[in-house]
């Protein structure tokens, strides 16, 4: 039977490097556990844990940190009491109740499928600049408003947040993709990488006030889709890749939708 370790090793081999320290088994029975089923999700939210249990799976593979705050178990000085915060305790208790192993695949799946599939969904074509996870796309000149409409259609979203410092009629042509959480203020270094490559517009996953302002002060527009929405297409394809590699394992994708709505 296939083990958790064999699945993780396959992903590591597929991207050509070891998994990062933040990846691998983060909770539950160890990596040598044999599995017959695995659910892949964006985050170990209660509904994703329930879906894995309902499917009779032993493994839940998530893209994001198991606990709050982000990667709380890794820093040298985590916030006091974080392990017993109700949200964290609830996740841990649900995993234990259903006998699930939780493994995280973060940057590895970003490299394997997620960034590529975000661009594919937006129909941006091949990148004109590609330095692994920093990619730039040239498109025929269009307005920021045109790109907003494209993103809304691509992800079936009725509304998006947009920072348009020069208005929706600004004509743009060089697109950067701060997918996932790379539009957030803590990751503005990624925005700078795209700025260095001459991008005049960003289509992001998740951003915040500081994240929007960093590029807005340079006249660069940013369109926010949401963290989950930008990564779900790639996670879904990762399931297909893993299912083909391990036909004895029942792989399923549990989609977590955007957590917010606009009214």
Image (spheres, grey):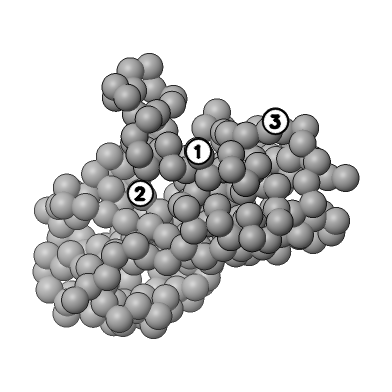
Give the position of the C terminus as an image quadrant.
bottom left
Give the position of the N terminus as an image quadrant.
top right
Marks 3, 2: nearer the viewer? 3
Residue 182 numbered tag: 2
Residue beneath disc 3 = 30
| Mark 3 and mark 2: Cα distance apart in space | 31 Å
How packed mark 3 is, by other alpha carbons closer than 10 Å (few <14, some 14-19, many 20 or more), is some
- Tell me the SS state at disc 1: helix
How packed mark 2 is, by other alpha carbons closer than 10 Å (few <14, some 14-19, many 20 or more), is many
Residue 204, quarter of picture: bottom left
Marks 3, 1: nearer the viewer? 1
| Mark 3 and mark 1: Cα distance apart in space | 15 Å
Q: Is residue 123 above or below residue 13?
A: below
| Mark 1 and mark 2: Cα distance apart in space | 27 Å
Q: Can you see residue 223?
A: yes
Q: Residue lying farthest right?
A: 1
Q: Is residue 191 left or right of residue 101?
A: left
- Residue 76 in percent (x, y) is at 38, 17
Please state which of residues 218 and 15 is positioned toward the viewer in this rendering.
15
Residue 90, quarter of picture: top left
């Amino acid at each position: 039977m296939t083990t958790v370790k064999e699945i993780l090793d396959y992903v590591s081999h597929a991207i050509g490097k070891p998994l990062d320290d933040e990846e691998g088994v983060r909770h539950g029975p160890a990596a040598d556990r044999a599995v017959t089923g695995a659910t892949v999700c964006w985050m170990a939210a209660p509904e994703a844990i329930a879906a894995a249990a309902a499917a009779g799976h032993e493994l839940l593979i998530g893209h994001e940190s198991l606990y709050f705050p982000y990667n709380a178990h890794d820093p040298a000085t985590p916030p006091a009491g974080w392990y017993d915060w109700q949200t964290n305790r609830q996740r841990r208790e649900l995993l234990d109740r259903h006998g699930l192993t939780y493994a995280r695949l973060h940057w590895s799946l970003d490299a394997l499928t997620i960034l590529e599939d975000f661009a594919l969904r937006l129909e941006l074509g091949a990148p004109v600049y590609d330095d692994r996870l920093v990619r730039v796309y040239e498109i025929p000149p269009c307005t920021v408003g045109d790109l907003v409409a494209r993103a809304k259609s691509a992800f079936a979203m009725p509304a998006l947040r947009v920072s348009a410092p020069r208005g929706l009629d600004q004509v743009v042509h060089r697109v950067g993709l701060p997918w996932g959480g790379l539009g957030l203020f803590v990751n503005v270094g990624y925005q700078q990488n795209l700025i260095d490559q001459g991008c005049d517009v960003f289509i992001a996953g998740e951003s915040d006030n500081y994240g929007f302002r960093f590029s807005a002060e340079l006249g660069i527009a940013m369109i926010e889709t949401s963290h989950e929405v930008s990564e779900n297409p790639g996670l879904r394809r990762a399931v297909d890749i893993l299912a083909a590699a391990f036909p004895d394992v029942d792989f399923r994708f549990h989609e977590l939708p955007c957590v917010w709505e606009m009214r």
